[in-house]
Structure formats: structure tokens, C-alpha cells
Image: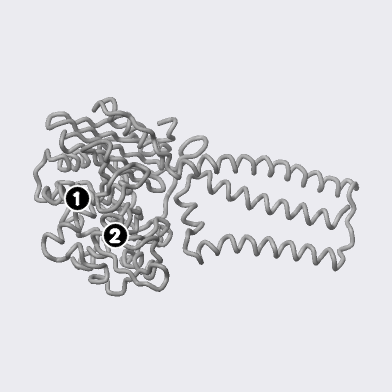
Amino acid sequence: MRRGKIPGLSIIVIDGDERVFIKNFGYADRGERIPVTSDTLFELASCSKSFTALALLQLEEQGFINLDDPISAYLPWFYARYQRDKKQEITLRQLLHHTSGIFWKSICNIPEGNANNALEQTVRNIVGIELKHPPGQRFGYATINYDIIGAVIEKVSGLPFEVYMQQKVFEPLGLIHTKVKVEIEKGNPYMAAGYKAGLFGPGKYNAPIYRGNSPAAYIISNAKDIVQWLRVQVGLEETPLNSLIRKTHIPDKTVPSPWINKSHYAMGWFVYKKEKGRLGHLGMNPNFTCEISLRPRRKRAVAILTNSNSRYASVLGSYIRKFLFDEKVRGIYYMPSYLSMRYSSKIAFMLSLYLTAAVWFLISMILDMFGGGRQFQPITMGILTQLTGTGLGIALLLMTAWLIPKIKRKFFWKTLIVWKPRIFSIALRLFLASIGISYIIYVLSLISK
């Protein structure tokens, strides 16, 4: 936990019908010294997708949808494109298996906010989106696939997504504490505070509300309910939804495996080829992480809930499986957020050195001006032109750097600041401060000698 900068976590282990292990560590809120308990609520992040997949299969079983129907059968205004001019139909099944062709950077199109139509707005934001490949040809993980599924669930059922999940999924499964985050009242004493990893430890971070991303990432639960969820997943608990849950475990083998983990994607679960019988999913939100691993044949499962955006949930999961289930520990895949923290840290360090030197030099210049060592020069038209041109050039470059990603719909800086570690935003601020100080030094060097 120290190495991973995790303030608090719950570990849940199921080993057969008789052995259930829950252990809680650290703090739900470090500042208030509130310890993690089995009642502490955590965001499940992308582990939410297995619940949403189950809800869609439930509607299919009831005859309200067909998984091989296109999205436009339920949301007529939606379409996507491939190679600009060719409109493409994406089926619900392709959304479930992440073979829609929608690129992962579409996460930038998810709007902030808590509006009642947030899911519809999320989908409308990607109408006409350019696909990375034709639907059904390759796996390509994109969280927004499951937000589209959530919008379809709302449209077909006539209920808000969170109401449908509560009435039709959570209650039949006996999950009395599990909810879609928007349904959690503000100030709930059981909700853990979220943290971001930083160089010197985790810092509390209040992430923006993304109601339009609820089906993919914002179901919340606690250790008590996760015990029940794991028991149902591995077949130790009978519920009305067991047959559909087994269906969510069936992988799509019609497309090649992604190179990262050599798995096939089922419906809300990765199914690992080299670890026969193991299913799992990692979820990372801006300030929470969750990892769940299942071995239904052996009736075993492990879940780790943390209130930090730390990759070490995966490390913990791997070693817990080794010690408890005698599984081989494989190489840990370094998540992009971890890599960006490492690189951002180096950049921030170099910028700090530069900024320190620049501030020292600026102070020296100002002292020289007051001490008579530097004299103000008359501001000529040439000097004014240089100052204006340089200032406009810097402003134009910064504006271009801010706008081009948005225009090209590749990524938005605001999204990066939310999802990246704290050191990323610190590095950005140091960069802007360095430009500002450098320009002031440039100005003083022109008007004084």
C-alpha cells in the first residue's frame, strides 16, 4: 500500500462454499482517520461493465432486444463512419465485446455533469465518429461502448439506467448496498474518499461527475456485496440471473486476442487463454481502482477495492492469487497512468530546476535595476514590435496546443488532467510558469541593459 500510494482497500477472497475471507486495510478517509470496513463503498470503475452486460442480456431474454440488431434500431439518430464516407452499423453484441471499432480515446467525449439525459448526451457526442476499424474485425477496448449500451437500456426499458439496475439487477442478486453512483446521497458516511497517486503519497481528489459514464465505470459497492457478487459469478449462489451470468462469461473468439494479456473478451470480462478458466477485469477511475478475478470451475474468486488510482491493485491481485491459489505470477503490465506518472515526474523535476534558475536570474535582474547595475532603455518601435510579436507567438502556440486535440477529436487536455496522476497537472503548471517567467526575463532584457 505504501509503494502503491493506496490509502485504503478491501480484499475479498472466495475459496469454495465454506471459505470466505474479507480483510480491510487503511483509511476510507485519511484526513478524518475513518478506517475502511466491510461497509465502505468503493467505485468499481470498469468492473461495472459486467453488471451492465447482464442487464442487456436480461432485456434480450425478455424479448425486448436482439444482440445482433444495430444501435440505430433503438437509437435511430446514431451512426458511425469508417474511412470518412462509409457509414457503418454497429451491433449491440459488438459493443459488448468491444469490437465496435470505436477508439479508446472516445472517453474524451463523455461530458461532465449529472443531467438526467447524460447518457443520451454521451452517445450524441460521438454521432458520426470515425471508427478505427470496421465493426466486428478486431478487439479495441473503449469504455464508451458500455455507455451506449446503457443508453439503449434506458430507451428500451423506459427507466433511468440507475433505476433499472436497482430494480432489475441489484435487488434480484441480493446486492443491497450496490448502486449506480448517482443514486448515492451526498455525504453518505460509508462512501470512501477518492485519492490520486502522487510523488510523495496519495492526495484526496474530488473527481468530476460523469453520469454519462455510469454504465461503464460508476457502479459502487462494498466488500459485503462483493462477496455475494463473487459467489453468484462462480456458481455458489442461486439467483434468477445465474443463467445469464454464465452467458456473460462466454468469450468472443471470432477476433484475434489483444497482445497485452492474450485474452478474449466476453461480456464485461476478460477470459485469459494462458490461465485456463480464469476470468477477470481491472477498473481504473480517476480516484478509485478495482480488480476482480474469477475461477468458476474451482469456485474461487478474488476482488480488490481501493480508493486510489494505483496500478498496484493488479500487483496485489496477482500475488494474492499466487499465495492462496498456487497460481504463477506473470509479468505485471504497467498501466498508462503509471507510465505517465514516471515520465511526468521526470519532466516536472527538470522544469522545477529550470524554474528555480529562472526565478533566481529574474530576481538578480530586478535587484540590478534597483541597484543601478541595469538602466532602463527607451522603448522604441523596434522593441515594442519584438515584445508584441513574441507575446502573440507564444499565445498562438499555446492556443493551438489547446485547441488542435479538440478539433481533431483525439483527446482533450481537461480529460487528461482528470485521468492522469497529480504530477501530470503539476508538470503542466510548471511548464506554463516557465513560459511566463521566461517571457518576463525577455521583456526586462529588452528594456534594460
Left or right, residue 244 beside residue 359: left
| Quarter assignment of residue 226 | top left
Q: Which residue is mark 2?
A: 136
Residue 338 position, x and y percent, is 46, 41
Q: Is residue 125 visible?
A: no
Q: Nearer the viewer, residue 181 or 17?
A: 17
Left or right, residue 29 beside residue 53: right
In front: label 1 or label 2: 2
Disc 2 residue type?
Answer: Gly
Q: Is residue 126 visible?
A: yes
Q: Nearer the viewer, residue 230 or 264?
A: 264
Q: Which residue is mark 1?
A: 248
Instruction: In the rendered structure, find residue 269 and report the number of the disc placed on it.
Output: none
Residue 253 position, x and y percent, is 24, 50
**Residue found at x 49% / y 57%:** 414
Above-or-below relation of 133 to 77: above
Residue 369 position, x and y percent, is 86, 49
Secondary structure found at label 1 = helix
**Residue found at x 83% / y 63%:** 383
How crowded is the residue under tag 1: few (<14 C-alpha within 10 Å), some, or many (20+)?
A: many
Quadrant showing the N terminus: top left
Q: Are marks 1 and 2 in contact (CB under 8 Å)?
A: no
Q: Earlier in the sequence, mark 1 or mark 2?
A: 2
Report the number of numbered marks. Answer: 2
Secondary structure found at label 2 = loop
Q: Nearer the viewer, residue 112 or 15?
A: 15
How crowded is the residue under tag 2: few (<14 C-alpha within 10 Å), some, or many (20+)?
A: some
Q: Nearer the viewer, residue 440 or 50?
A: 50
**How far apart are the two marked residues, 1 and 2, measured between alpha carbons?**
18 Å
**Residue found at x 35% / y 69%:** 80
**Residue found at x 55% / y 64%:** 403
Disc 1 residue type?
Answer: Thr
